[in-house]
Amino acid sequence: MAASKLQAFWNHPAGPKTIHFWAPTFKWVISIANVADFSKPPENISYPQQCVVACTGVIWSRYSLVIKPKNWNLFCVNMAMGGTGIYQLSRKYLHDRASETEEAVAEE
């Protein structure tokens, strides 16, 4: 049974014999790098970069479910990209708001 499942995976239209498998697999590096940046200070986070990561994740997640065959690896990696991008944007936004509040209090 395991051999037949492995063979089905190997011969799948989005399996390891195609670019449809390897491109999203290597795209995981971007999400892993974004997770590694969670320890970065929020003031070093770039709004434009994280907007692109988040939007790419959201847009391509939808696309990965529309194409035939459905590419679940592409869907998962793009959900991870969207999630990490949105999380980083929220960290930056909350940090900037807190900094503005601290500056306003210091001026008074």
Image (cartoon, rainbow, N blue to C red):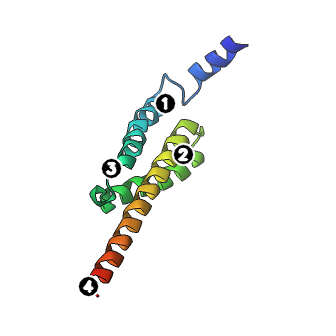
Tell which circle, 1 or 3, labels the residue nearer the N-terminal end: 1
User: Marks 2 and 3: which is nearer the front?
Assistant: 3
Q: CA distance from mark 2 to mark 3?
A: 30 Å
Q: CA distance from mark 1 to mark 3?
A: 31 Å
Residue assigned mark 2: 64
Residue assigned mark 1: 21
- What percent of the width, then of the height, locates residue 55? 43, 57
Residue assigned mark 3: 40
Q: Return the residue nearer the eye: 12 or 29.
A: 29
Q: CA distance from mark 2 to mark 1?
A: 12 Å
Q: Residues within 10 Å of mark 4 (few under 14, many from 20)?
A: few
Q: Which residue occupies 44% across, 29% down?
A: 22
Q: Return the residue nearer the eye: 53 or 10.
A: 53
Any part of residue 67 in sight: yes
Tell which circle, 4 or 2, labels the residue nearer the N-terminal end: 2
Tell which circle, 4 or 3, labels the residue nearer the N-terminal end: 3
Q: Which residue occupies 37% across, 66% down?
A: 95
Tell which circle, 2 or 3, labels the residue nearer the N-terminal end: 3
- What percent of the width, then of the height, locates residue 86? 46, 58
Residue 64, quarter of the rendered image: top right
Q: Residues within 10 Å of mark 2 (few under 14, many from 20)?
A: some
- Amino acid identity at mark 4: Glu
Q: Is residue 108 above or below residue 6?
A: below
Residue 36, quarter of the rendered image: top left
- Amino acid identity at mark 2: Ser
Tell which circle, 4 or 1, labels the residue nearer the N-terminal end: 1
- Amino acid identity at mark 3: Lys
Q: Is residue 86 above or below residue 66?
A: below
Q: Secondary structure at mark 4?
A: helix
Q: Secondary structure at mark 2?
A: helix
Q: CA distance from mark 4 to mark 2?
A: 50 Å
Q: Residue furthest right?
A: 1
